[in-house]
Image (tube, coloured by chain):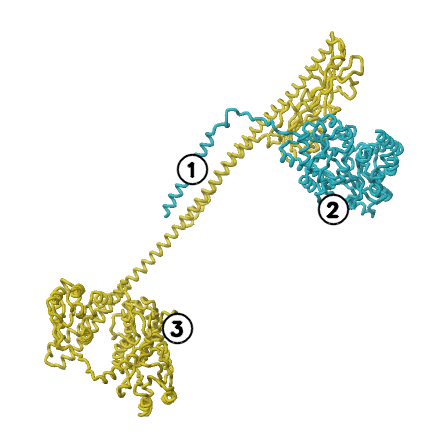
Chain colours: A yellow, B cyan
Amino acid sequence: MRNKQSKENINKGISLPLSIILIFAVLACIVFLVSYKISREMSESAIQNLNESLNLIRSTIEAVLNQEAEFQKLMAQEIAESEDLKEPILRYGENQTMIQISLICAGETEGITSKGERFTEEGLDFTAKGTLDGVDISKSYLNHMGTWAYTMKCPVIKDGEEIASLYVEYIYDSFNKSLPEGFYNKRAMLYIMDGETERFILKPKGMGERDAGHLNLSDYYRANEINETEIRNEVAECLKERRNIMFYHDIRGKDSLNYMWAVNGGTIYLVGYVPIEAIQQEGRTVNQNIFIVVAVMLIAFFLCCVLYYLNHRQQNKLREEREKEREIHNQQLAEALQAAQIASNSKTTFLSNMSHDIRTPMNAVLGFTMLLARDAENPEKVREYTQKIRASGQHLLSLINDILDISKIESGKVVLSVEEFTLNDLVSSVDAVIRPMAQDKEQKLFVDVTGIKYERLLGDETRINQILINLLSNAVKYTPKGGSIWFRIIGLKQRSSQFEHIRIEVEDNGYGMTQEYLKTIFDAFTRAENSTTNKVQGTGLGMAITKNIVELMGGTIDVFSEEGKGSLFRVEMELRIPEGQMDKQFWAEKGISRILAVDRDRDVCHNIQILMNEAGVAVDQAQTLEEAVSLILDSPKEGYHAVLLDNHLASQAADQTVQNIRDMLPDSVPLLLLTDNGTNETKNIIQTDNIRILSKPFFVSVFKETILKMRSVKEKSDTGQPEPDSSLDGLNLLAAEDNEINAEILHEIITIENARCEIVENGKLAVERFMNSAKNEFDAILMDVQMPVMNGYDATRAIRALARDDARHIPIIAMTANAFVEDEKEAINAGMNIYLTKPIDVEALKQVLKQYIKTDD
Amino acid sequence: MISNNKKRLKNLTAICLAGATVLTMAACGRKNGSGVNLAQMEESNVKIVNLFSPMEKMDAKVKNVARSAADKTIMLAEEKLGVEVGYVTYTAENYQDKTYDDVTLDRARNNMDDIYLLNPDTMRTLGEEGKLRDLSDLKCVNNLRDVVKAANIIDGKLVAIPQEVVAYGLFINKDMFNRYSLPLPETPEDFLECCKVFKENGIETPVGANRWWLETFVLAQAYADLYNGGNTEAEIEALNNGDSKYSDYMRPGFEFLQEMIDLGYIDAKKAYVSEAMEGEREDFLAQKIPIVMAYWGAANTETAYGNPDFEMLVIGFPSNRGRVPIITMTGFGIGNNAEHAEDAAAVLDIILSDEALQIYAETNRVISPSKNVEVECIPALKPLNDRIQENVYVLGSNAGLDVEQWGNTCLIVRDLLNGATVDECMAKFDQLQEEAFNK
């Protein structure tokens, strides 16, 4: 079947060119026949035309000869009528036609010329018997003028008796006047040949090629290579019989029509040739035009073929491209379907996980609530249950926050809030969150900051914090009890002086990950699960969120992990350095220009040196206490203005060593003991006015703060000012909260803190209540954001717009479930002082209230 | 996208078809002719100049280089002046016919043409008859070599100017000389010895001759001393005064020719009836004879002796001063009563200008009459050219001599060929000298 189809295709493929060839063959035959016919007809026509032309020339010459003969006869009559025969002769003058007129009387051999000179027939040959109307014509001869001439001899008859002969000499040159100037556009050659001698006696002007010349017929034959005996015999025959002859022969490589045309009965001949191309000029032109048309048609046809071929190829190409596109499209569809299915599966898994993850703490909440109701009288149980309910609630909150975050990141609604922050705050806050978690699992957390030149940077601290919390909480999660976690912030070489290039590394020696999982670790809704970790709770969104945020900040995140050995997450990013980085003036004001850093670890000393040098403070290093003592003793007069001493080094020294160092220093010079964060070593340190603890890693800001505190304490102790009260006692708060439960909780919390709280249901009521309040009646306003009638933002704006003094100053604290940065920004823009997210952290609320009310005071 | 392309293609095709249709209709619908009167007007303002010159017999297979060179200069003149130069030619069919010189004289005397190509003798004859116009006013005259001017001044008028200085020499088949270990002949005796050796080796007639150029042998022996002895002017004056006799100069050459004839080295009968190159060319090219005589240009053109199948050398004629070339000039003259004399003068000024002579000399590889034109000669001509460069030559014609040499010597040599004795020939010279003296 296939073979049959293939044969049909081949037949089709062959038949098309065959048909085209056939058509062209037929066309070529037709064109050839038409051209041939045209050529033949034109040739016949041309030959006829040449015949007519030659006849015309012959007639012209014969007419001239006839006229000459008739005129001579008239002259003879005139002479015959005169008494003195010689007298008329002498009267004739020379002219350009009749070169010489002579007369010989009958019976005499000598006569006279018109010049009166002696004349004989010597040199004249009338034997050829050429006659014209009874007048004899001599053979051609070269006359005294050096040109070819002939003489006509006419009898002078008187009374029927020939009394004399009249001789008139004519030159052939005179024919020039009667013959056309040019023959076949001057391409034809024409000679006048003497029939008897076969000598060429005239080449009329304009006849043939200028540089060609022939003596006689045999020279003509030789020069033109007419050597064929047949032709020569035929010509000889015709000349003998005084007939015309015309034949084809090549002349100088051109096919030519040769002719010998008898004039005056063959006494002279027109001899020459015409190139065929000159004769058939019209025919050739027609044929050329036909060929041009055919050539144009052929070119057009081939162009059409080429166009057809190109078009066909283009179509095939397009078809192939379409097919490829379709294939790709199908593949993409298949992949999309697969991805959708995977996504669907992921979502299903996610939902399943969420269902499990949400239900678990929810179950705990509800269960403990039930237990709480049952054991309400038992304070111990109540505390235990409430603590567990709180933990479950926190977990639920983190779940919800993650889901909201990833949703927002994926929809591209995340905007970074770039503000100035210090690495110290960042590390501290992260440490504060993670260290308890690690301690719960008896894990060791090492925090290390090295190579950082600038600790005040511009960036979204909240998001960086989120990244670090995610990475570190994961490390805690996926590291078994007793494991170690390393948190490093490393300053890399700056690519630009305006950016600090930092690397954050979070390393653990935990479970590690499989290579398969590593491939999908940053995908949303994935979570490592195996027999070891399936008890770990989480949304599986943390790493996806982390990666997205890192990339949003223009950074990169890499992960290296080996199952059973641990993991390393490495984040690199560049953070802009704010202007006025170092408050050099502070150190100058405080009189600190030189300090001593004492630590076993040279890196720590070096790090301190780098940071303090930027602040304009010189740093001397010592790795041992002895070295430190030596440096202090050898120091110049001003000495050191502060000493940073590794507590570990101090603890290993003898009891009095530190005190000795302290004693060696003036009282005004602070001694700061560097401790590892999270260790219990600080418990045994007795902090005095000039001995304080400084947690590692070393940060200038912390150092500065500590110095400030030490000085302020000293000043306070000098002035005797009491410590401020930290409770909310006696505060009167106005709260706007539409949710009754939340309102109740808030009311209770504030009441517990011995403060008063008046709650209204929406923003409008809050505005009205504040309007109607007495001046400074309320110490602060707690404002929910999403409320009916008037939301918190509008209400804040309305309050701030009120025309009373306290309206502009009263602290307004936002309390909202909208936990995004954008919401916080909007709150601040609306005129709120600070932004707290629900559920309310009582301690945070207390701190904020104290801060703002105090500030307000 | 595809549909747009198709649309564009369709539009393009439609436009092309429409254009083709319009053009076809326009072409087919064109009226015949551009006016009512279809007669083609004859050109009546074309200036005609007639040039009379010999026409060498044509060979179908080769090109006449000399003729082509002249044609190029004529075409240059036609182009620059807008004239039409018509060629009028004559060549004798056989020895019984009038010679070209005879016909030239007849035509010039009857004012048949405007420009004539003149041999030295006809130039002298016509010059003396006052039939030729003085060409001294032509611009091209300033460029001519002095020897050229001197040779063409008759009665104080410059009556002809050549396009080339023609040097005659012996054309030698060097291969044949080598075959018999013969040195190139320096003296008449050497020459006779060479002929003897050739004859002994079966070459019946070693020297190919015609009725025109045997005079060169005579002139070489006659005037080698006169022109190269350092006393030229005095000797010429003595001849003109009658103190010396032409016959005394001519006798050794005639006797030499007579000896050649007697020994059968020259076929006198054949030479007497042969036109230039007619009798000897074929034999020389076929290496049947080792020696012919001809002019410089014959070595360059295939219609004469160009590109032979053997090593050819052109040397001077033997004399007691060694090999000497004979120098003569065939110049253009204008009839004193020529119908188109002014146009003819303008034509001459162009074809004899340095530009034209450069073209001529480069085409023909000849010695130019202009002192500003120099071209290298072909190797075969080097021996002849070397002698000319050494200023060793004999003038074939000299207007300073009262008796015309070139033509008269030619005619008297013919008499010798026809059987006259050397004494009879010398008597004719004496007669000519007397006639000239009595003028």
Tell which circle, 2 or 1, labels the residue nearer the N-terminal end. Answer: 1
Crowding at dot 3, Cα within 10 Å, few <14 / some 14-19 / many 20+, comes out as few
Please, is residue A353 above or below residue B199 in the view? Answer: below
> Does residue B117 appear to the left or right of A377 in the view shown?
right
Question: Mark 3–mark 1 contact, CB under 8 Å?
Answer: no
User: What amino acid type should be assigned to the residue bearing mark 1?
Assistant: Leu
- To which quarter of the image does residue A351 belong? bottom left
- Chain letter behind tag 1: B
Label placed on residue B379: 2
Left or right side of B171 for A699? left
Q: Chain of mark 3?
A: A
Give the labeled residue for mark 3: A493
Residues marked 2 and 3 touching at CB (< 8 Å): no
Which element carries disc 1, helix, strand or loop?
A: helix
Q: Position of residue A452 (x, y in %)?
A: 35, 75
Residue situated in front as seen by the camera: A615 or A206: A615
Question: Foreground residue, A762 or B187?
Answer: A762
The numbered dot on residue B17 is 1
User: What is the distance, in whole Å, between disc 2 and disc 3 at their CAs?
Assistant: 88 Å
Secondary structure beneath dot 3 equals loop
Q: Nearer the viewer, mark 3 or mark 1?
A: 3
Marks 2, 1: nearer the viewer: 2
Do the dots labelled 3 and 1 sit on one chain? no
Badge 2 marks a residue whose secondary structure is helix
| Discs 2 and 1 carry the same chain letter | yes
Identified by mark 2, the residue type is Pro
